[in-house]
Image (tube, rainbow, N blue to C red):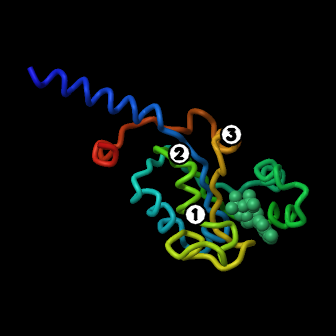
Amino acid sequence: ALALPAAVYMLQEQEAHAAEMERTFIAIKPDGVQRSLIAEIISRFERKGFKLVAIKIVVPSKNFAEKHYHDLKERPFFNGLCDFLSSGPVVAMVWEGEGVIKYGRKLIGATDPQKSEPGTIRGDLAVVVGRNIIHGSDGPETAKDEINLWFKPEELVNYTNNAEKWVYG
Ligand code: ADP
């Protein structure tokens, strides 16, 4: 008699979590790749409990970098930034989880590594703003746009990670 309500309850819990699932675009920039920080960075998102649903390594063209950073085209550092992003391999990823857009930004730390808290990726691993090793979408709209820019729909993988029930209860 208890089994059915418990199963229904668990299903409702899972549906509640599913409703709050979101995805963000995260990129390890050429400096992070060259400094052999790929595993370190992935590990921080993975250990948190977020789920990797897409990953590839690419050298973006200058034109592609300009598309990615189009919001910053009026800034004085725009050209140098786009040159830099297209200067070597970038690890492009999509991470999924509850609150992953906002919390991903917390894991990353402030834009200027001098202002990033210790314990954050930029705080622990970078020194200057022009070489801050990682990008993360800054909100739901940019997350959607950036995922669409960097990935084809079929490159995103839907799967259940066995640890999810321990991460979300
Ligand atoms: P974030 O990457 O934290 O979202 P922004 O969107 O403001 O930050 O800027 C995008 C990227 O542009 C930064 O990650 C950094 O690499 C670069 N950038 C930002 N401000 C400067 C600056 N003053 N000088 C050089 N590069 C900068």
**Residue at 63 percent of width and 36 percent of height:** 152
Instruction: Count numbered badges in the picture.
Output: 3
| Distance (Cα) linking label 2 and label 3 | 18 Å
- Disc assigned to residue 141: 3
Q: Is residue 98 above or below residue 121?
A: above
- Amino acid carrying label 3: it is Glu
Q: Is residue 166 visible?
A: yes
Residue for badge 2 = 54
Q: Is residue 47 left or right of residue 9?
A: right
Q: Position of residue 55 (x, y in %)?
A: 54, 50
Q: Is residue 70 above or below residue 84?
A: above
Q: Is residue 85 visible?
A: no
Q: Position of residue 62 (x, y in %)?
A: 82, 56
- Amino acid carrying label 2: it is Ala
- Disc assigned to residue 86: none
Residue in the foreground of this view, choosing between 26 and 65: 26
- Amino acid carrying label 1: it is Ile
Quadrant of ligand 1: it is: bottom right
Q: Is residue 97 above or below residue 4?
A: below
